[in-house]
Image (tube, helix red, strand yellow):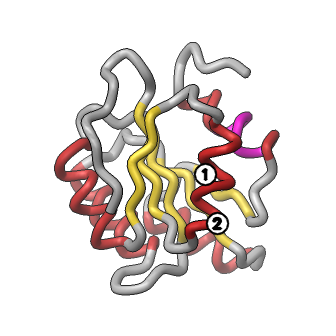
Amino acid sequence: MESKIPNKERPLILVAEDDESNFKLIKAIINNRCDLLWARNGQEMLNLYEQHGEQADVLLMDLKMPLMDGLEATHIIRQSSPDIPIIVQTAYAFYEDQQQAMVAGATEVLVKPITLMALRNSLKKYVPGLTW
């Protein structure tokens, strides 16, 4: 888990992603406009959310991760935080997978590979003042 003190003047995004290359892609797309904290599985995301959830603007949640998947982590976070935007990312484009994510509490579902425009357009919905 990559954790540092976020800058209160910049939006904070918590990212759950077990693949380092996917995290680097997200980081490149966001291009230093937000602070990112990285969790490599759902359990780490719960820990990050416990520490930084009140400052977080958005959660990016991968579905398939070791130890705890994104569905379970989303469901747990959603029980205590009904309003935090949770953008689920999945490599599985099946309708059933997307529906399961929404039932678990996802705000939106993006299908991997995530494109620059898809992620930026999604983030602009939930982070006021974020521009590219």
| Depth order, front residue of 121/1 | 1
For the C terminus, the quadrant is: top right
What SS does tag 1 mark?
strand
Residue 56's place in the image compared with 69, above or below, is above
Q: Residue at x 42, y 69 (%)?
A: 40
Which tag, 2 or 1, sits closer to the chain's start?
A: 2
Q: Please provide percent x and percent y for residue 62.
A: 54, 67
- Neighbor class of circle 1 (other Cα within 10 Å; few <14, some 14-19, many 20+) is some
Question: What's the CA distance linking mark 2 and mark 1?
Answer: 22 Å
Which mark lies nearer to you, 2 or 1?
A: 2
For the N terminus, the quadrant is: bottom left
What SS does tag 2 mark?
helix
Report the residue marked by disc 1.
108
Report the residue marked by disc 2.
21
**Segment tinted magenta in the rendering:** 118-122
Residue type marked 2? Ser
